[in-house]
Image (tube, grey):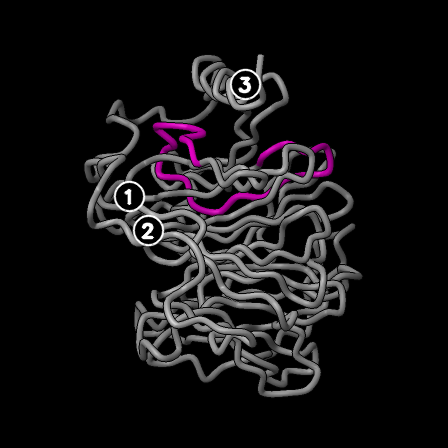
Amino acid sequence: MDRRAFLATSAAAGAMLATTRGAIAETERPAGETGVVLPASSEAKLPLGVLPNTRYPDTHIESLDKRFKGSVGTGAVERVATGFRWAEGPAYSAAGRYLIFSDIPNNRMMRLLEDDNHLSVFRSPSYNSNGNTFDLEGRLVSCEHAGRRIVRTEHDGTVTVVADRYNGKRINSPNDVVVASNGSIWFSDPTYGADGNYEGFKVEREQEKHNVYRVDPQTGAVTVVVDDFTQPNGLCFSPDEKKLYIIDSGITHGGAANIRSFDVDIATGKVTNGKVFAEGFAPGLTDGMRCDVEGNIWCSMGWADPKEDGVRCYHSGGDLLGKIHLPETCGNMAFGGMLRNRLYMCGTTSIYACYVGVQGAGRC
């Protein structure tokens, strides 16, 4: 059996074998009530390949500081996949050499093979999945808006519910997730997937606060680590896991648009000394982020000035080092490739990629 057929078979098996213990007891709605999937062959699709009017060095990659490693000289920003309604939650599998990402309103997860850019549906329905990552064993961990839960896809294709409640009440709408080196799972819980029937279900929110949670790797206990965000969104650890960065995209609900940093003890879950790390995103916002091996923070940008759509890179000290400009609002990104030096970026309807001069930290 060839590799592509094997992956397709595995995905189908995963969908059939999926289990949902403790999940959606109060509703028998379909797994998402959102838009019709875009046609496979649509004239509205954007062309793949390097962006128009590109020449080396690529002007889509803007250096503001000599420490910025966004350009490799003979490289450019490319559109590698298109045809989505709202692409989000990218995570790269080093073992499989593929990118997983969510097409949230279309209620599906997609898989993009690195070697030939073959695109296929990984899971549908996906319960309007958003953020994804891989754990220490290479298992996919995902946030589900419609399911209101964190799930893990096991190696045999079954799906385990990792967290769906705190203090006996349903979590609101998990958005982004990271796994620490000790196996603890950390995730944000804003309300975006619970605010309407486009990216999830419009439901009564059971958690009063919009928290960031930690799932203990031994007991599975769910605890709150931060509770004072308007809309906690993307999150990541520094390479040494002594800092935790969390995005607040609360400008959508009358709050802040910034990134905050915290001192963190991953063993105990204790988070202290919170402060604003980066701001100046308003009237737009940042949504997702990743850290590279040098401690720089790469974050998405969009929702306001089209000239700012794309990715920003900040030094660990807070200085803005450079930008990658995209023709669409960017929601999130992930480092991938065999050397972890290829940055995959989720635009609104498309996936973009470019090689950068630094490697990503962590597993995706």
Residue 116 visible in the displayed image: yes
Disc 1 or 2, which lies upstream in sequence? 2
Placement of 123 over or under 350, stated as above or below: above
Q: Which residue position holds label 1?
A: 105
Q: How many marks?
A: 3
Residue 186 locus on image (x, y percent): 61, 49
The answer to which image quadrant residue 146 occupies is top left
Q: Amino acid at mark 3?
A: Thr
What secondary structure is marked by label 1? Answer: loop
Magenta-colored span: 119-140
The answer to which image quadrant residue 197 occupies is top left
Q: CA distance from mark 2 to mark 3?
A: 26 Å
Residue 133 on the magenta span: yes
In this view, the residue in front, 213 or 241, is 241
Q: CA distance from mark 1 to mark 2?
A: 7 Å
Placement of 207 over or under 306, stated as above or below: above
Q: Is residue 283 left or right of residue 265?
A: left
Q: Residue at x 28, y 43 (%)?
A: 105
Q: Amino acid at mark 1?
A: Pro
In this view, the residue in front, 337 or 149, is 337
Q: Which residue position holds label 2?
A: 86
Residue 123 locus on image (x, y percent): 42, 28
Residue 101 locus on image (x, y percent): 46, 43
Disc 2 or 3, which lies upstream in sequence? 2
User: Is mark 1 in CB contact (under 8 Å) with mark 2?
Assistant: yes
Q: Residue at x 41, y 68 (%)?
A: 326
Instruction: Categorize mark 1 by other alpha carbons within 10 Å: few (<14), some (14-19), many (20+).
Output: many
Q: Which residue position holds label 3?
A: 158
Q: Residue at x 31, y 76 (%)?
A: 304
Instruction: Categorize mark 3 by other alpha carbons within 10 Å: few (<14), some (14-19), many (20+).
Output: some
Q: CA distance from mark 1 to mark 3?
A: 23 Å
